[in-house]
Image (tube, rainbow, N blue to C red):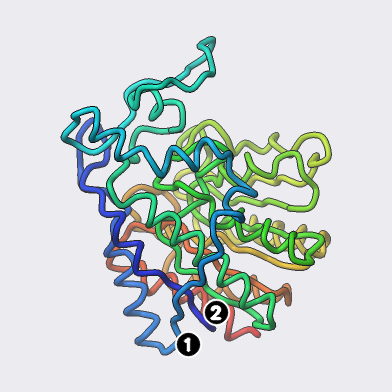
Amino acid sequence: MKTVYAETHALRDAKTEVYGGELVYPFERPSRMTYILDRLNTVQLGPILPPDDHGQGPILAIHDKGLVDFLQTAWDEWTAAGYAGEAIPTCWPARRMVQRCPNHIDGKLGYFALATETSLTEGTWPAAYGSAQVALTAADLIRTGERAAFALCRPPGHHAALDMYGGYCFLNNAAIAAQHYLENGANRVAILDVDFHHGNGTQDIFYDRSDVLFLSLHGEPENAFPHFLGYTDETGSGAGAGFTVNYPMPPGTPFAQWRKALADALDKIAQYAPDQLIVSLGVDTFETDPISFFKLKSPDFTTYGADIAALGLPTLFVMEGGYDIDEIGLNTVNVLQGFLGAT
């Protein structure tokens, strides 16, 4: 299996994250990629390729131009305002407030952010832009004949909504790849999100559309970020009614229970019969992940990789979360090897 990877991810090297009332070193850090690359090379999964540059067009086909422009200028505006730290929002347009973008960077941060944990830094935009190009290039590999490909994206993307960033995500790589498929011959795309956290951004983008089936297995929002989306009664609206499927699960969920949800999701994907499958691959379902509460073990990732392969669909894996740094490489590559072993 070919992997696409961009070294520009390292430009996103935040030093601060708001967690537990403290400023801590972020869980989402550049070394995550080092461990995955090391494992890819150890097992010789396949060649690792740089991305092609598709420009901003595919990004703007998914995201509001205001968000894209903001991400490109936010750091300069922040430093021009005289602030010394990393850019963290301090206020939001909450209930019954005006939904209007302010001029000052403090207000802009709150307008475009969906959470406070994700600081903006000098290299955020080029890293996010490169991550989107990784997803697009890997999608092109499949469009031109590959059975599967791995987009080793960083920053991740599934929390990035139409016009909001947060949850370590700035541009929604999986959504951008899905739209790219649709604009290049596909009629239907399925996105299966197996990250521990709900893919709120992906749901937001495709909620009223029937050409993308979105399914998410995640920690129940009563107890897990992003808290305000991911319930079972969120099933789509308008033309998209019935094309969003959520599987929220409680703390301590073991693999057997999680796999039952996966089996149902895979059955729905088979019925939908998409031209392409995208897997938002987060391995923060692992039992010792520091910010999650599922109990999957390393061999389980191999097992469910094979389960996904049984669909027999062209499959793009897009890297999302996973924060047990020591095990992220093993668990990520286990999914890919399980998929390959069953094809």
Position in image of residue 211 (x %, y %): 79, 52
Q: Is residue 305 left or right of residue 14?
A: right
Mark 2, residue position: 338
* Point 44% across, 76% down: residue: 50
* Point 55% across, 74% down: residue: 303
Quarter assignment of residue 70: top left
**Which quadrant is home to the N terminus?**
bottom right
| Amino acid of disc 2 | Gly
Quarter assignment of residue 85: top left
Q: Nearer the viewer, residue 311 or 205?
A: 205
Q: Is residue 173 left or right of residue 271?
A: left
Position in image of residue 231 (x %, y %): 62, 36
* In the image, residue 294 above or below residue 110: below
Q: Earlier in the sequence, mark 1 or mark 2?
A: 1
* Point 56% across, 71% down: residue: 137
**Which quadrant is home to the C terminus?**
bottom right
Residues at marks 1 and 2, CA–CA distance in whole angstroms: 14 Å
Q: Is residue 296 left or right of residue 303?
A: left
**Mark 2 nearby-residue class (10 Å; few <14, some 14–19, many ≥20):** many
Look at discs 1 and 2 and give the one toward the viewer.
Answer: 1
Mark 1, residue position: 46
Q: Residue furthest top?
A: 96
Q: Which mark is residue 259?
A: none
Q: Residue furthest left?
A: 84
**Mark 1 nearby-residue class (10 Å; few <14, some 14–19, many ≥20):** few
Q: How many marks?
A: 2
Callout 1 touching callout 2 (CB < 8 Å): no
| SS assignment at label 2 | helix
| SS assignment at label 1 | loop
| Amino acid of disc 1 | Gly
Position in image of residue 307 (x %, y %): 64, 72
Q: Nearer the viewer, residue 36 or 288?
A: 36
